Amino acid sequence: MDTKQRILDEALTLFSEKGYANVFVADIAARVGIKAPSLYKHYKNKQAIFDAIIEEMNRRFVEQAGALQISGTDAAVDAEIYKQISEEQLIDLGKNLFLYFLHDDYTRRFRKMLTIEQFHDKKLADVYMKQYVDDPLSYQGMLLGMMSQTGILQTDNVEIMTLHFYAPIYMLLTVCDREPKREKEALKTLEAHIREFNRLYGRKSG
Amino acid sequence: MDTKQRILDEALTLFSEKGYANVFVADIAARVGIKAPSLYKHYKNKQAIFDAIIEEMNRRFVEQAGALQISGTDAAVDAEIYKQISEEQLIDLGKNLFLYFLHDDYTRRFRKMLTIEQFHDKKLADVYMKQYVDDPLSYQGMLLGMMSQTGILQTDNVEIMTLHFYAPIYMLLTVCDREPKREKEALKTLEAHIREFNRLYGRKSG
DNA sequence: GTCTATAAGAAGATAGAC
DNA sequence: GTCTATCTTCTTATAGAC
């Protein structure tokens, strides 16, 4: 990785841990293995580093739109699969989403940074909201809607059903971001949640 | 309100909007109507102001433990009420919790500050987690457990049922913290959520 | 308890050699 | 592109008069 990219990478790590204001240009430089003034050959100033991170984040989010939400294939393919989904597959869907959000290195650091800086910059609150609330609800709503149409799930309010599916995942994610030690417990809860979800919304006959 | 208390109040407002590092002692002083040096007659330094806020927050949280979660009365009384709860009362329970968290001035500013500073100070992450995840789940778990025992709600996993009740409320809260304009929409969603929750877990006969 | 003046230090950014 | 040296600005905090 070239220096310019490494600066972004190390800066993101630091920003996600301490917040923009608590990270000094010298800290970033030190992690890259250079001195602070050298950094100004790559970026105009500290703010420019931050802006470049946001830009890259947006680029990655668009790029990986599908992968971010689910299995990595596109929505139409996913829909075909989930028309005949089993309980175990539904659990996998939830777990994969949860673990991707939680473990993907870029995603995790971006989310932490967004969380810290969201009230400082309205744009970041918007990005966070889109990425972790509106997009997942919309994509999963589409999938669960398919399952509802084929009778695998039964409801007359897909939006609320999707909220019931995703809100616990979201909540467990915010828990594990703050207390990584609770991941194992969270995964157990997640599985129990989806089994109960399937029982509540699934066909009454197996 | 005396100067010492007003300093805390104005500092909390600023910290919750910009984060600790972006607030200058002179900003706080200006809002109180004094100059920065005068402020040092009341607090040893900037950090001491922050610490005093946290202390007051903890004190208030303990004080209002009951009120924070629900109607303002104590748990045993609440339990009696909710043994024979109607759907409308269940909706009120959720809405009251949501609106208290969202609108109570102190609560709102504290929560925003905790959100911003949580990765900077592990203690704050703990306070946040207790206040907005563990305590609500525990208190509401107790209430819903009562309702389950009297047959108003039916489940063999109270913990997951409570998660299904509270996670959507929590998620809508994080949405409205970031985008206050979505409150009206959130309240509609909240009501639809609880009606569906009641349909899913309620007695099959009216 | 509040003020003005100011010290002390931190952090961002630039200059210019290599 | 990286360095050392340095400038500049901003911010916390103190000194001492009123």
Image (cartoon, coloured by chain):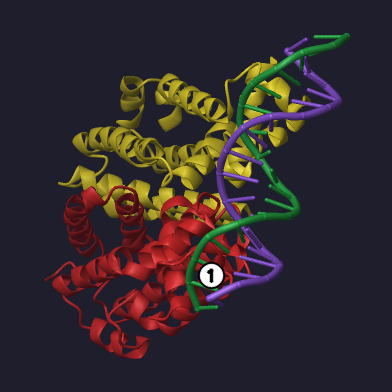
Chain colours: A red, B yellow, C purple, D green
SS under mark 1: helix
Residue B132 horizontal side relative to residue B76, left or right: right
Quadrant placement of the C terminus of chain A:
bottom left
Q: Residue furthest left?
A: A206
**Residue highlighted by disc 1:** A38
Subunit bearing disc 1: A
| Residue B1 versus residue A99 in the image, above or below | above
Give residue A167's position: percent from left, percent from top: 36, 58
Q: Would you say B152 lies left or right of A115 here?
A: left
Q: Position of residue A149 (x, y in %)?
A: 33, 80
Number of numbered discs visible in the structure rendering: 1
Where residue A147 appears, x then y in whole percent?
Answer: 29, 78
Q: Quadrant of residue A145?
A: bottom left
Q: Quadrant of residue A12?
A: bottom left
Is residue B71 visible in this depiction of the protein? no
Q: How many neighbours does mark 1 have within 10 angstroms: few (below 14), some (14-19), or many (20 or more)?
A: few
Quick one: quadrant of the N terminus of chain A?
Answer: bottom left
User: Residue at left 39%, top 62%?
Assistant: A31
C13 with respect to B103 (left or right): right
Q: Nearer the viewer, residue A74 or A112?
A: A112
Tell which of B158 and B133 is nearer to you: B133
Q: Is residue B29 above or below residue B141?
A: above
